[in-house]
Structures are given as C-alpha cells and as structure tokens.
C-alpha cells in the first residue's frame, strides 16, 4: 500500500484528462505539497496501480520521462500520449502551452464542484 503522500499524488494524476498533461511540480502543488516535484517522481517510480495514468506527467520542460529504464518507459510514454492526441515535437517533447492541464484550485482544496480548466495556446494566466 502506498503512503498517504503518494496517494495524494496519485489522486491528482487520476484527474488529468486524456490528451492533457501536468508537470511533476504541477502535481505536487495540486496535491498541496509545493516544492516536492522530485517526490512525485519517486511516487511514480513506486507506482503499482495501473489505473493511474503516469504517462500524463512530464517534466517542467515538457519532456517525457523515463520509466522502467533503458528508454523503454520513454517509448511507452510517447506511444500512450500520442494515442491520446498529444503531438510530440523534437526529442520527446511537447508544447506545454498546448497540453498543460490546470485544475481549478478551489475544487482541489475545498472539494467544490467548480469547473476544471484546460489551459490552451493563447490563454493568459489568471484569465477565466
């Protein structure tokens, strides 16, 4: 069984819609643990639950991560993201401005039924 901290990260990751991504830092913030991006990576490395869409978590530069060693995980992540319609550019990178998912903070912290927001190209931070 995963720790309460890891479960908090997994809950956030399960909420990422298909075709969208969050960074490790985004997940940590949404889980109420800002500054713990590396811990999100540790949690994903320890992940045993196949229902958690780990492939939707990328690094701060929009790069896919390596899971399973020897590049196999990166290839698997690339394939899964592409199946969801995410277009990768260059060496396994995506445009965060196009695919980054930003959950509604009030929904995360207060459990309200506010609408989640997907940031798309041209969105201004803080605009609704």
Image: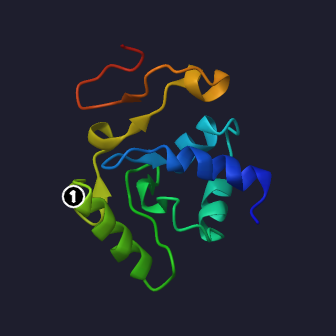
Is 122 drawn above or below residue 95 in the view shown? above
Image quarter (top left, top right, bottom left or bottom right) of the N terminus:
bottom right
Residue 84 left/right relative to 67: left
| Residue 75, image quadrant | bottom left
Closer-to-camera residue (4/40) = 4
Q: Residue at x 48, y 47 (%)?
A: 23
Q: How many marks?
A: 1
The image quarter containing residue 81 is bottom left
Residue 100: give x, y in percent of width and height.
37, 40
User: Looking at this view, is 56 or 15 the one in front?
Assistant: 15
Q: Is residue 14 above or below residue 111?
A: below
Q: Is residue 114 above or below residue 40?
A: above
- Density class for disc 1 (Cα within 10 Å; few <14, some 14-19, many ≥20) is few
Q: Which residue is mark 1?
A: 89
Which of the two residues, 11 or 123, is positioned nearer the viewer here? 11
Q: Look at the numbered disc 1 and give the secondary structure of its residue.
A: strand
Q: Position of residue 116 (x, y in %)?
A: 43, 27
Q: Residue 72 vs residue 89: left or right?
A: right
Q: Quadrant of the C terminus?
A: top left
Judge left or right: residue 96 versus residue 23: left
Query: Is residue 101 toward the left or the right of residue 68 in the image?
Result: left
User: Residue at horizontal 60%, vertical 29%?
Assistant: 108
Residue 73 on image: x %, y %:
43, 76
Residue occupying the point 63% across, 25% down: 111
Report x, y in % for residue 33. 70, 39
Q: Colour mode?
A: rainbow
Determine the residue positioned at 48% across, 31% down: 103
């Amino acid at each position: 069984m995963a720790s309460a901290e890891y479960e908090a990260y997994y809950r956030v990751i399960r909420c990422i819609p298909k075709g969208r991504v969050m960074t490790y830092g985004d997940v940590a913030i949404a889980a109420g643990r800002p500054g713990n991006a590396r811990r999100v990576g540790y949690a994903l490395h320890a992940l045993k639950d196949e229902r958690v869409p780990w492939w939707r978590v990328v690094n701060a530069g929009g790069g896919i991560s390596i899971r399973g060693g020897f590049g196999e995980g990166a290839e698997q992540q690339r394939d899964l993201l592409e199946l969801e319609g995410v277009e990768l550019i260059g060496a396994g990178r995506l445009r965060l401005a196009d695919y980054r998912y930003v959950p509604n903070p009030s929904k995360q912290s207060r459990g309200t039924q506010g609408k989640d927001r997907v940031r798309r190209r041209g969105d201004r931070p803080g605009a609704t």
